[in-house]
Structure formats: structure tokens, C-alpha cells
């Protein structure tokens, strides 16, 4: 064989081998599952509890009438700044004023009768004491002494009865006088009139122990606002008094206000009982720490309560964390003979997730582990992790991973079915998505 032929044959052999390698790599790459790969990184995590509510003044008073009467005058309008004691509403007082005068006449009459009863009592008491002294000296008869005694007791009884009637008449007079005062409704505090829901000529329904009555006006202190929200029972335990809050008001986009937790309810608020949407929440009040004249009562707001934070926390995306069921016997064997890769679970039988649910036989005892699939040498490797606090997108990993570890973060349909040792490759990020 000539040298020329040897060179041609050798070159052809190299081409064939190269082609086989390329085909093999291509076929191997085709068998690998395309996944989204993220790295475990250190970052600042801020854990928050979010809820929606409405802005309201911290202090407000609903003005109602305590008597049933026609409204004769309204002395304040919505938006007015009023002082404590300032007149707001005047009710019809003609009938009540008449009742006051009638009660006054009754009181004067019974007071006069009481004075006469007191005079008669004093006279009867004086005569009784004189007869008693004479009787002790045998200067009067037994009958005269008894007559004086009974006269005194009768006068005393009449006086006490008249005195009780006088007290009753005075109470009736003061009651009618109080009704008359209540025809003039004044501001109980300084503030701004934020609601006027009455008109002249309307009958103001009285608020009693048994009826709510109608709110005529609402008086609010607009110097201090708060947001009242309902927090789910699973998150309210994270909330404590004094925690810092970021308040976002829908009326002011791209603007947030500083706040603070000032009140946490102790009574559960149940809703949709007996349905699929049943929920248990607790009331939480958040105060604005700054004053803004543009904020109005009733505005919709979202609060983010900072419940915890961690600097330089090792974090991974929420989407990367999964829970898998493993055979306990295999887990024990893996612990006694750990794999070369730190944190990996080697030779452990995971439940088949092809249907989307973990399966287990009656004879096998299984254990659920929280972890991630780390990508090592192009293959998926399950690593058990322990987690800490979390923000909206990422969760802290307290053990099991190191910064820089590559892990599978999606897609969800792939992540729920991937198995230990599966070949994986990084898929291209969708257009517009940051790497």
C-alpha cells in the first residue's frame, strides 16, 4: 500500500470517527430533558405578609340623634373643619320645650306640697315631744299622749311620701330638660366633617339601647390615618406590634407610605362557612407614620408588613423547591453509605411521579423530603434541603446547598416528573425574560 493510499484511508477513518462522535453527542443531547437552570445565590431576603384594606381615620365619630325629632337646621357641611362643642344640627324643640315647662310646673307644685308637709311634720313632732315630757310627769292623760304620737307618725309618713313624689317630679323635669339639650347636637371633638347624610325636614331617628339610629354626620380626625386589613390565620402569627409596613394606596401609583402595626385582633373573622371558600382571618390595623393631605378616607390600599429579613441569605427560586416521597429503607442505606456527591440521595427509590402524584405500596414505608434537583455533570441529582424565610420569589436555604450550585427551576411540568439521574440540558430563556 502506497503512502498516498494510507493517508487517504487514515483521513477517511478520522472523518468516520468524528461523524460517529457528532451523531452520538447529538443523539445524547436529544435524549436530555430541556430544563430552566438557576443558581443558588446569596441575596437579601425580606419576608412580608400582604393584605388589602381601606384607608380610614384613626379617630372618627358618627353623629346620631338621641331623640326622635325633625331636623330644623344643619350648621356644617362636608369638608368643614369644626371645633369641639361647635353646633352641628338643630332639631325641632317645640314639643320638648312644652314638656319641660309642664314638668317644671309639676315640680313646683309638689315642692310646695313638700314644704307644707314639712311644716306639719315639725308641728306634730313638737307636740309629740311636749306630750311625751308631760306624760312622764303624769301631767297628761295616756290618750292625749297616744294621739300626739300617732299624729307625729302620720305627719312623718305624709312628708316622706311627698318627698318621694318631689324627687320623682325633679327626675322627670331633668329628663325633659336633657331632651331639650339634645335638640342641639354639638361636635364632641375637633375634626373635619367627612360625611353629611341628612336634610332639613327629615326626621332624625333616635339611637337607643335597642336601635342603631341613623348616622347624620361623621366627624373625623384627618391628621392620623390607618388601614384596617384582614390577615389569614396561617400568617397572622408572624405579625407583631411595631413591625414596619409599606402602604401602597391605589390612588397614588408608584408611591408607597411608611407605616407601623398598631393593633392585632384576637377574635377570628369567619367567612363563607361550610363552603370551599371558607376562610379564617384576623383584623390588623396599620397606622400611617407620615401625614399626606391628599389621602382620603375610603381609599383602597395594600399593606406589606415586614415580618422578617435576612442579609446575604443563600436563596433559590420558589419554583425549584419540590417535595418527593422516598422509600425509608433506601434512605437508611443511603445514609450508611453516602454518595460521593455531597447532599445527594444515592440509590434511593423515589415514588413514581409520572401521574403527578406520589405512589406507595402498602408494604413500603415512605418519607417525604423537601429538596431541589441539582445539575451535576449534565444529570439531575436530588438534594434534600432545609429552608428558612422567603420573599415573593425566593426562599432561603439553610442547609443542603452551596452558593453557585446549579439547580432545576422549571418548567413545572418537567420538574414534577424528573427523576434522579435523568440527563438534562439548559433550555433557552423565553424572549424578554432575564437570565
Image (tube, rainbow, N blue to C red):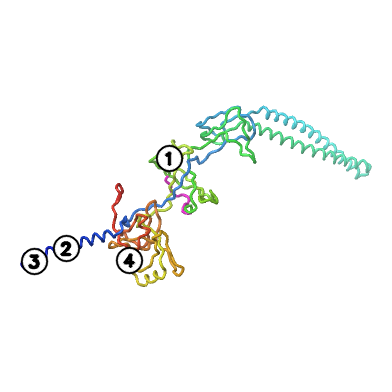
Mark 2 and mark 1 in contact (Cβ < 8 Å)?
A: no
Q: Which mark is residue 6?
A: 3
Name the residue nearer the viewer: 274 or 222: 274
Q: In the rendered structure, which disc, 3 or 4, sits on the residue that comes first in sequence?
A: 3
Q: In the rendered structure, which disc, 1 or 2, sits on the residue that comes first in sequence?
A: 2
Name the residue nearer the viewer: 365 or 149: 365
Lateral position of residue 74 relative to residue 244, left or right: right
Q: In the rendered structure, which disc, 4 or 2, sits on the residue that comes first in sequence?
A: 2
Q: In the rendered structure, which disc, 1 or 3, sits on the residue that comes first in sequence?
A: 3
As measured in the structure, the alpha-carbon distance from the residue carrying label 4 to the one carrying label 1 is 49 Å
Lateral position of residue 54 relative to residue 103, left or right: left
Name the residue nearer the viewer: 88 or 414: 414
Residue lying at 50% horizontally and 37% vertically, measured from the top left: 221
Can residue 139 be seen from the camera position used here?
Answer: no
As measured in the structure, the alpha-carbon distance from the residue carrying label 1 to the one carrying label 3 is 81 Å
Q: Which mark is residue 250?
A: 1
Circle 4 residue: 342
Instruction: Tell me the element at label 3.
Output: helix
Residue 45's x, y, as percent? 37, 53
Q: Which residues are magenta?
A: 237-246
Residue lying at 41% horizontally and 71% vertically, measured from the top left: 329
Instruction: Tell me the element at label 4.
Output: loop
Mark 3 burial class by Cα count in 10 Å: few <14, some 14-19, many 20+? few
In the rendered image of this protein, does residue 249 appear above or below residue 7?
Answer: above
Instruction: Tell me the element at label 2.
Output: helix
Mark 2 and mark 4 in contact (Cβ < 8 Å)?
A: no
Residue 405's x, y, as percent? 31, 60
Amino acid at each position: 500500500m502506497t503512502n498516498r493510499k494510507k493517508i487517504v484511508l487514515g483521513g477517511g477513518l478520522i472523518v468516520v470517527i468524528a461523524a460517529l462522535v457528532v451523531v452520538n453527542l447529538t443523539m445524547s443531547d436529544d435524549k436530555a430533558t430541556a430544563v430552566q437552570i438557576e443558581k443558588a445565590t446569596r441575596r437579601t431576603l425580606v419576608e412580608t405578609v400582604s393584605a388589602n384594606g381601606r384607608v380610614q381615620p384613626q379617630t372618627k365619630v358618627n353623629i346620631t340623634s338621641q331623640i326622635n325629632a325633625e331636623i330644623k337646621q344643619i350648621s356644617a357641611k362636608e369638608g368643614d373643619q369644626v371645633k369641639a362643642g361647635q353646633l352641628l344640627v338643630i332639631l325641632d324643640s317645640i314639643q320638648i320645650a312644652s314638656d319641660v315647662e309642664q314638668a317644671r310646673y309639676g315640680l313646683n307644685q309638689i315642692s310646695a306640697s313638700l314644704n307644707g308637709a314639712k311644716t306639719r311634720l315639725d308641728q306634730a313632732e313638737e307636740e309629740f315631744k311636749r306630750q311625751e315630757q308631760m306624760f312622764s310627769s303624769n301631767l297628761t292623760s295616756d290618750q292625749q299622749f297616744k294621739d300626739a304620737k300617732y299624729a307625729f307618725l302620720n305627719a312623718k309618713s305624709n312628708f316622706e311620701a311627698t318627698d318621694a313624689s318631689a324627687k320623682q317630679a325633679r327626675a322627670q323635669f331633668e329628663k325633659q330638660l336633657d331632651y331639650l339639650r339634645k335638640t342641639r347636637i354639638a361636635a364632641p371633638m375637633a375634626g373635619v366633617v367627612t360625611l353629611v347624610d341628612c336634610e332639613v325636614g327629615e326626621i332624625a331617628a333616635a339611637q337607643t339601647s335597642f336601635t342603631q339610629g341613623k348616622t347624620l354626620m361623621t366627624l373625623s380626625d384627618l391628621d392620623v390615618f390607618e388601614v384596617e386589613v384582614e390577615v389569614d390565620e396561617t400568617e397572622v402569627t408572624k405579625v407583631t406590634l411595631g413591625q414596619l409596613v409599606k402602604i401602597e394606596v391605589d390612588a397614588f401609583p408608584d408611591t408607597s407610605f411608611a407605616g407601623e402595626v398598631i393593633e392585632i385582633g384576637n377574635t377570628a373573622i369567619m367567612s363563607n362557612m361550610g363552603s370551599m371558600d371558607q376562610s379564617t382571618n384576623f383584623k390588623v390595623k396599620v397606622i400611617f407614620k407620615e401625614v399626606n393631605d391628599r389621602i382620603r378616607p375610603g381609599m383602597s390600599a395594600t399593606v406589606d408588613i415586614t415580618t422578617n429579613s435576612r442579609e446575604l441569605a443563600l436563596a433559590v427560586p420558589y419554583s425549584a423547591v419540590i417535595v418527593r416521597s422516598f422509600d425509608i429503607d433506601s434512605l437508611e442505606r443511603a445514609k450508611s453509605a453516602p454518595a460521593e456527591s455531597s447532599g445527594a440521595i444515592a440509590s434511593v427509590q423515589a415514588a413514581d411521579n409520572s401521574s403527578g402524584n406520589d405512589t406507595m405500596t402498602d408494604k413500603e414505608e415512605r418519607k417525604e423530603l423537601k429538596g431541589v434537583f441539582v445539575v451535576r455533570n449534565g444529570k439531575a441529582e436530588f438534594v434534600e434541603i432545609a429552608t428558612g424565610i422567603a420573599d415573593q420569589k425566593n426562599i432561603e436555604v439553610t442547609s443542603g446547598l452551596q452558593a453557585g450550585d446549579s439547580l432545576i427551576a422549571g418548567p413545572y411540568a418537567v420538574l414534577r416528573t424528573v427523576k434522579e439521574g435523568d440527563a438534562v440540558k439548559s433550555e433557552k430563556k423565553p424572549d424578554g425574560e432575564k437570565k
